[in-house]
Amino acid sequence: MPFKGNPVAVVLDAENPETADMQAIIARWTNLSETTFLLPPTRPTAAYRLRIFTPGSELAFAVHPTLGSAFAALQAGCIQSHNGRIVQEYGAGLITIKTTEDKFFLELPQCLTGNELSDFSGL
């Protein structure tokens, strides 16, 4: 539904602007919860590299702008899915998005199990 939900500004085909410019000019100017920049990938399996900014900081990862950016890139013809999959590159790594005709799904890494989070006293 157009104009419903949580909007995200997506800057397509960004030409590696400086981080300070992305933060100060664009993210604050849009004043949306997130603004994303699609940049050329540095990893050969990725369709593009994504950087996500809030008006106050850069995020390593967030679901809403990840899916919104993939949708915008496909709709604009900037990328194509390969066998219903898009690989996005982040500072945090790679993530795969599965696409159908009208839906997008994240393929998230397997959760850690065991004692990794057994001690919450320091949190």
Image: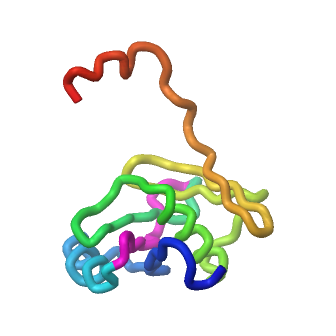
82, 25: nearer the viewer: 25
> Who's the residue at 40% across and 14% down the image?
115
Q: How far across and down, in percent of the image, does residue 120 sit? A: 28, 22
Q: How far across and down, in percent of the image, does residue 104 sit? A: 67, 60
Above or below, comparing residue 69 to residue 108 in the picture: below
Q: Residue furthest front?
A: 4
Residue 25 in the figure: left or right of residue 103: left
107, 17: nearer the viewer: 107
Above or below, comparing residue 49 to residue 17 in the picture: above
> Who's the residue at 63% across and 73% down the image?
79
Residue 61 in the figure: left or right of residue 88: left
Which quarter of the rendered picture does the C terminus lie within? top left
Above or below, comparing residue 103 to residue 35 in the picture: above
Residue 22: quarter of image: bottom left
Residue 21 painted magenta: no
Residue 71: quarter of image: bottom right
> Who's the residue at 29% across and 62% down the image?
58
Q: How far across and down, in percent of the image, does residue 82 sit? A: 73, 60
Residue 33 in the figure: left or right of residue 18: right
Q: Residue furthest top?
A: 115
Residue 25: quarter of image: bottom left
Say how many tags the image has. Answer: 0
Q: How far across and down, in percent of the image, does residue 92 sit? A: 39, 48
Residue 26 in the figure: left or right of residue 5: left
50, 99: nearer the viewer: 99
> Who's the residue at 48% across and 65% down the image?
65
Colour scheme in use:
rainbow
Residue 36 painted magenta: yes
Q: Which residues are magenta?
A: 32-44
In terms of secondary structure, what is the magenta stretch mainly?
A: loop
Which quarter of the rendered picture does the N terminus lie within? bottom right
